[in-house]
Amino acid sequence: MRAYGFTAVGGPEHEAFLDVPEPVAGAGELLVRVLAAGVNPGDRRLREGAHGVEPPAVLGREVAGTVVALGPGTAGFAVGDEVFGGCPGMVGGWAPLARVTASFAAHRPVGVSSVDAAVLPVAAGTAHDALTGLDLPAGATLVVNGAGGGVGVAVVQLAAARGLRVVGVASPAKHDLLRRFGTVPVAYGTGVLDRVRAAAPSGVDAVFDLVGGAALRTVASLVGDRSRLRSVADKPLVAELGGADVARDRSTAVLAELARLVAAGGLDPHVTRVVGFDDARAALAAVERGHEAGKVVLEIG
Ligand SMILES: NC(=O)c1ccc[n+]([C@@H]2O[C@H](COP(=O)([O-])OP(=O)(O)OC[C@H]3O[C@@H](n4cnc5c(N)ncnc54)[C@H](OP(=O)(O)O)[C@@H]3O)[C@@H](O)[C@H]2O)c1
């Protein structure tokens, strides 16, 4: 089977199409013929050794496709079902056949394309879980740092649906998009704190960071109560600042809810680039640059 992965830990020079055996679904897993797969910053992190996955390994952590086999003890799905979900160990999705964790998979509703479904587990799933963890009341003000990215665009929409006021920190190129989702956009860089305070005169109740580093350190000062600070971009720094990572709920229930929202027009997965499998290298390179206009998807089937 021809899959896309990496042959050594490090930079993109180690990426390659690999000839690997067809996977077999283990206990609690689905074997899926992949139609589409999401591309995420986490794929770069994996290639750089962040998760301790030994090369050679196949990249790709989220897919949509058709169930072709069920592992032992797997309930709730049948061969032929159209599904989407996350891959065990966050590997293996960029291939014609992939294993998917059944407890982190859901049926793809009619009206939701495989391209849109493929990007829900990581970006929208993380956005959902961040909001659940923060548990802010309607009318509270949330600042999203990196609001124009994959997780950011999902979180601003889900936050608006919960009745939150959202201030989104993003480059000016993303401001019109954010306004369409009911977010007040502000530019990052020098003076960002003044711009956020002007956009949120009654104060900031929580900050969700998707950038990390110095940008996280700056926006953290907007919340005195650091239990209201979250980051999935820089786990050591957010812990140092008294905030927290997002506790993920990788469940069928969350994925089903997100797909229902997409089908009802309440969540736009905002896929802006669909790339053929042969161009997997370019797809990851685009995400790695960190300023894509929206989600990037590999079309594999
Ligand atoms: N569960 C998890 O642990 C988990 C899950 C998903 C994502 N993540 C992590 O979360 C981060 C974001 O993921 P993503 O998929 O949303 O990435 P993405 O689509 O690449 O978005 C990152 C965004 O950061 C913005 N940005 C860059 N520098 C900035 C600055 N100084 N101030 C404010 N915004 C800035 C970029 O905006 P402009 O284009 O406007 O410059 C871009 O839209 C990544 O580090 C990823 O690895 C973790």
Image: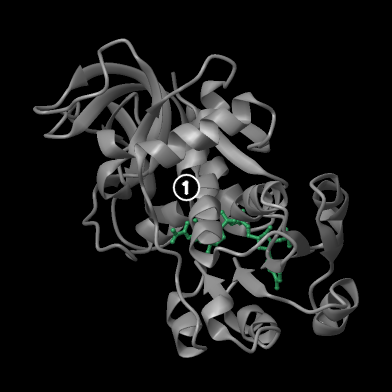
Q: Residue furthest top?
A: 80
Q: Secondary structure at mark 1?
A: helix
Q: Type of residue at label 1?
A: Val
Quarter-of-image position of residue 64: top left
Q: Position of residue 221 (x, y in %)?
A: 67, 88
The answer to whether the beta carbon of the residue marked 1 is less than 8 Å from any atom of ligand 1 is yes
Q: Quadrant of residue 189?
A: bottom right
Q: Is residue 127 left or right of residue 42?
A: right
- For the question of whether residue 250 can be seen, the reply is yes
The spot of residue 298 in percent (x, y) is 51, 32
| Residue 255: image location, x then y, percent | 45, 37
Q: Is residue 193 above or below residue 266?
A: below
- Residue 280 seen by the camera: no
User: Where, quadrant-wise, is the N terminus in this rendering?
Assistant: top left
Q: Is residue 283 above or below residue 113?
A: below
Q: Is residue 81 above or below residue 163?
A: above
Observer-nearest residue: 219 or 198? 198
Q: Which residue is mark 1?
A: 122
225 vs 95, left or right, is: right
Ligand 1 falls in quadrant: bottom right
The residue located at (72%, 53%) in the rendering is: 163
**Which residue reaches farthest left?**
72
